[in-house]
Image: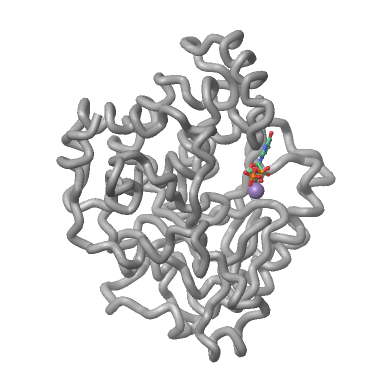
Amino acid sequence: VSGLSTVPDLAPILPNEPTPVSASQRVKACFVILVRNSDIHELRKSMREVEDRFNHKFNYPYVFLNNEPFTEEFKELASAVASGNTSYGLIPKEHWGYPSWISQQKAAETRTKMKDIIYGWSESYRHMCRYESGFFYHHPLLQQYDYYWRVEPGVKFMCDIDYDPFVYMHVNQLKYGFTISIHEYRETIPTLWETTKRFMRDHPEYVSHPNTLEWVVDQKSGDYNLCHFWSNFEIGDLAFLRSERYQAYFDYLDQAGGFFYERWGDAPVHSLAVAMFLRKDEVHWFEDIGYFHNPASNCPNDPVINRDKCHCDPTKSVHLGSWSCTKEFMALDPNSDISAKVLTVE
Ligand code: GDP
Ligand code: MN
């Protein structure tokens, strides 16, 4: 696998136009998988599908990350499925633990109070969400890459991907790619939106114009409408996450404490960052990538694509229902900018 970025100036390619396997176009990209040793068998299912649907032709490398050292058994079983190189990283303690300003007692009380909310009781889930929000892209094993594709144990890929989504991102200057968008549970993020608005007030210089804020704001109340991209699948530009504005936003949220005093997910965090910092034309719905993460799927509705490339039920695709926010995203005006209006609402 050549790691060099040699993409020439090309006209944008369309997802359904196959790029030849021999194409010299290559970007510095990898799969990134945060995973526990105990998830190896669920992980191998995901990797098998990644390979069968896509990577057996492209051989992109995999980076595995863990807050505990990977076992020899894990490495042996994971590398046996991968057609590309594999590397195994330990997460530094500073990135998976409590920052000095967080009261661990208050964090523990929060977990008791939130015990009936999904993952509300979980301490490790909060470390995971904080890590995926603000640290994974800083891991030394990722420094050589420009793009990442997040994969989780137990997910499915149901359509052949005959082109290179990383090259597609690069050629079209896309910063963030998703398959599924849905509404978040409000109880997990009571103060995320007011904290985000405070950030925009304190740092108006970071907000892009136009932007995609309209997609996340309820027109009547001015409140967060809970729409977010599901971050268990992401194809993204690492430079976006490593940017000063993204890092400033993460640090601001981290100071506010909601990763521990509430249960802020990395999905709404990434999505609100996209909403503030990216234009619609920098964000891409990979409609053609059949994808399942319990309990939702994305499945192409085009009858020919579905018949020839997929094995999924198009009528079950979550974008057809009201839990999804993808229709609204696609309908958004590319020139939309409601940032001034957002900040007039208390
Ligand atoms: P859900 O998708 O929100 O239900 O959360 P998951 O349980 O799938 O966790 C999200 C991702 O983080 C998956 O890739 C998990 O493998 C990973 N993950 C979750 N908790 C831990 C943990 O404590 N340690 C490690 N190493 N990975 C974790
Ligand atoms: Mn998951």
Percent coordinates x, y for residue 204 in the rendering = 18, 34
Picture residue at 43% right of the left edge, 54% below the top? 236
Figure check: 95 above or below 18: above
Figure check: 29 above or below 7: above
Quarter of the rendering occupied by the N terminus? bottom right
The residue lying toward the viewer, choosing from 18 and 87, is 18
Picture quadrant where residue 94 is located = top right
The reply to whether residue 173 is visible in this rendering is yes
Quarter of the rendering occupied by the C terminus? top left
The residue lying toward the viewer, choosing from 152 and 263, is 263
Looking at the image, residue 72 sits to the left or right of residue 255; the answer is: right
Figure check: 139 above or below 80: above
Asked which colour scheme the image uses, the reply is one colour
Picture residue at 47% right of the left edge, 11% below the top? 101
Percent coordinates x, y for residue 67 in the rendering = 66, 31
Picture quadrant where residue 206 is located = top left
Picture residue at 50% right of the left edge, 10% below the top? 100
